[in-house]
Image (tube, helix red, strand yellow):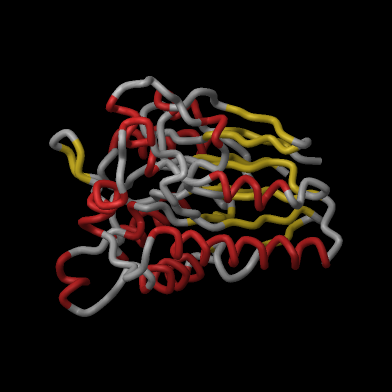
Amino acid sequence: MRLIALGDLHYPREGKLFYQFLNVIEKEDLDLILLCGDILNYGNAQYLRDFLAKVHRRTSAKILAVMGNHDFWLSKSMIKKGLTSWHLIEIYDKILREYNDILLWDKEFVIDDIGFAGVPGWYDYSFAPWSFRMNRWVLDSGYYMGYQWNDFIYTKFNMKVEDILKIHLKKLRAQLNRLKMAEVKRVIVLLHFVPLREFVLTRNSPEDFWNAYLGSEKLGLEILKYSDIVRYVFFGHTDRRNLARDIVEKNGIFFINVDVSHNLEHMFVLNIS
C-alpha cells in the first residue's frame, strides 16, 4: 500500500500549491491520501465538492481526512442560519461520502489489516508562554500585539476550548479502543493540531504567545496509551518553520508534521507492505 499524508492545502486560497499537489498525485500510484485538516480555507460545501472532484479526476486513491480549524470557520450566512461549527462535521462527512471518501470522526477505517483513526484535536492553552504573564481573558480573546487569532472570530462551538478538546479526545479514544478490540496490528492516526510539547518552538519573545493555539499535549498522551498498535501520527496546523522539530519518535510511535502550506515537499510518502 502506498499513501501520502499532508495537511493545510487551504483550498482555494493556495491555488498554485493545490495544482502542484494535483500534479504529484497524478504521477504517483497511490492507494490512500491522508489529509490532516485545513482542507479548505473556511467551511464551504461547494468548495469541498470542487476540491474532491478535481482530486478524483487525477487519482483513484481514497481520501481519509480530518478537519482543521479553518474547516470549522463559518461564513456570515451560516451564522445567520443558526449553524455552529459542529454542524460542519456533518456537512463534510456527507460530501466526503458522496465521493466514497471518509471523514475520521465517529468511525475509524481499516484496510489490509491497517487501522486509521483521527480527529482534528484542539488547543487548551497548555503550550502558552505563561512567563509573559498571560491570563485567561487575553487567551480567550486571541488578541495580542495588534493581531487577532481568527478562530475566535469565525468559529462557534459555544463552549470553552478545554471542553472542545475533551470531545475530540473522547472520539479518538473510542476509535483506538475499537481498533484494539479488532486486533489491528498497525494504526496510523491523523490529527490537525500539535500533539506533543517537544514540537513547540520557544523563542523567548512575545511571538511565543501564539503557541497557546498550537494544540495540546493531551493529544499525544492519549495516543501514547496505544503504543502497542499506533505506528505513525501525522498532523499539520503550523509550518515547520514555527516548530522546534519535524519528527519526534516516542515509545515506537513516529509523530510527523506534514503541513504543506509553504512547501509541498513536507508531505510524507509511506509504503506499507
Residue that sits furthest to the bottom in the current view: 81
Residue 115's spot in the image, x, y percent?
73, 56
60 and 146: which is toward the camera: 146
Would residue 15 appear left or right of 75 to someone viewing this image?
right
Name the quadrant of the N terminus: top right
The structure residue drawn at horizontal position 44% and vertical position 56%, both measured from the top left corner, is 67
Would residue 261 appear left or right of 230 to someone viewing this image?
left
- In the rendered image of this protein, does residue 93 appear above or below residue 11? below
- In the rendered image of this protein, does residue 82 appear above or below residue 32? below
Q: Quadrant of residue 63?
A: bottom right
The structure residue drawn at horizontal position 74% and vertical position 42%, both measured from the top left corner, is 231
Q: Quadrant of residue 269?
A: top right
180 and 10: which is toward the camera: 180
Residue 226's spot in the image, x, y percent?
76, 51
203 and 19: which is toward the camera: 203
Would residue 136 appear left or right of 102 to someone viewing this image?
left
Residue 237's spot in the image, x, y percent?
42, 41
Residue 32's spot in the image, x, y percent?
61, 49
Name the quadrant of the C terminus: top right
